[in-house]
Amino acid sequence: MKINDLQALITDTNSISLSNSIELYRSAKPGLPLLVIDSPLCNAVLSPYGAQLLEFKSKGKAPLLWLSPKAVFEQGVPIRGGIPICAPWFGPHPTDSHKPNHGFLRNNHWAVESVEEFSNGEVKLDFLFDTQNTETKTYDYYFQIKLSMTLGESVKLALTVVNVGDAEMPFSWAFHTYFAINNLDATRVTGLTGEEYLDQTKALSTCSQVDDITFTNEVDRVYQEVGEEQSIRCDREGTVIANIKGHSCPSAIVWNPQTELAAKMKDIGPNGHLQFVCVERGAVFNDIWRIKPMSSMTAGLILQ
Ligand code: TA6
């Protein structure tokens, strides 16, 4: 999306301004254009590249999301932090290891279709990506995807995928949310206790989640057919860091890389893992969507 197009879109809005990653994060050139929101209800930063919410803070509350201080803002590289959209496959491509991890939507520019401000103070942005316009080689199927973000006291996301091809389309996806924390040892995730999960650190062996999730080792777990709600809590401070409510998001993925892996990942780095946990919602593994030709599927997520 061109800067001029973005400028034209936000001309009549009070709460949204245009900036870029070089100014906001002192990142190296060429950088990426970013939208900055300062509304009566919240502060946020968004990137049309990846249709990614990078920062969100409702007024009077702590920042909800973690954006890595080592994030790279460059075409072709996913931005580490916020809410990347993983799709149309989750993790490695099922048959071709040369294709990007977690699909191509977080590595491409989306169009900003519309921007609205409501009298209640909420701001809504619609992002669109159409494989017929922008991506023809990476995937065998054609689809349009729309992501609506409504930002106010909470983050509300609505995702709609339309299969515009003539064959049934497998579609695996996740909101790969990085939640900001400040005490990993005291952080736990509730709402998945009693569920079975696939342990990605143990070659996808099936395990049982006996208690709430804590983060003493590397955690990389896939839960399928889960309930709608989870929470992230900090025991030491007795606080709820986030409430997560998914609609038509049958899977949950919980990830923290721990010391060794974090140090190896350039855009996280030593001790970076102490600042976030990922609690993702979507449709992966056996929960994958199968969308009939000329049909659509939708899902929603509320974070607060
Ligand atoms: O969602 C968990 C996960 O799939 C992990 O296996 C881990 O590798 C993480 O995502 C990050 O993947 P990325 O491609 O962003 O480095």
Image (cartoon, helix red, strand yellow):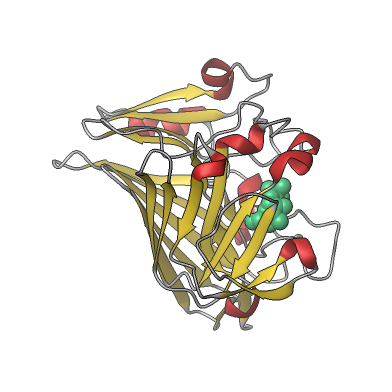
Left or right of 159? Residue 174 is: right
Which residue, as the protein is rendered here, is positioned at the far front? Answer: 236
Q: Is residue 228 above or below residue 243?
A: below
The image quadrant that residue 300 belongs to is bottom left
Left or right of 103? Residue 92 is: right
Left or right of 304? Residue 171 is: right
Left or right of 44? Residue 205 is: right
Which residue, as the protein is rendered here, is positioned at the far left? Answer: 119
Position of residue 72 measured from the top left corner of the image (x, y, whole percent):
67, 30
Q: Nearer the viewer, residue 119 or 94?
A: 94
Q: Is residue 289 above or below residue 266?
A: below
The image quadrant that residue 39 belongs to is top left
The image quadrant that residue 171 belongs to is bottom right
For residue 135, say whether it is visible.
Answer: no
Q: Residue at point 48% right, 74% down? A: 226
Position of residue 252 measured from the top left corner of the image (x, y, whole percent):
53, 65
Q: Nearer the viewer, residue 85 or 1?
A: 85
Position of residue 282 measured from the top left corner of the image (x, y, whole percent):
52, 65
> How many labels sit on residues?
0
For residue 186, say whether it is visible.
Answer: yes
Q: Nearer the viewer, residue 119 or 8?
A: 119
Q: Is residue 83 above or below residue 145?
A: above
Q: Nearer the viewer, residue 3 or 245?
A: 245
Position of residue 256 measured from the top left corner of the image (x, y, whole percent):
64, 48
Q: Residue at point 35% right, 45% down? A: 114
Q: Residue at point 29% right, 34% down? A: 42
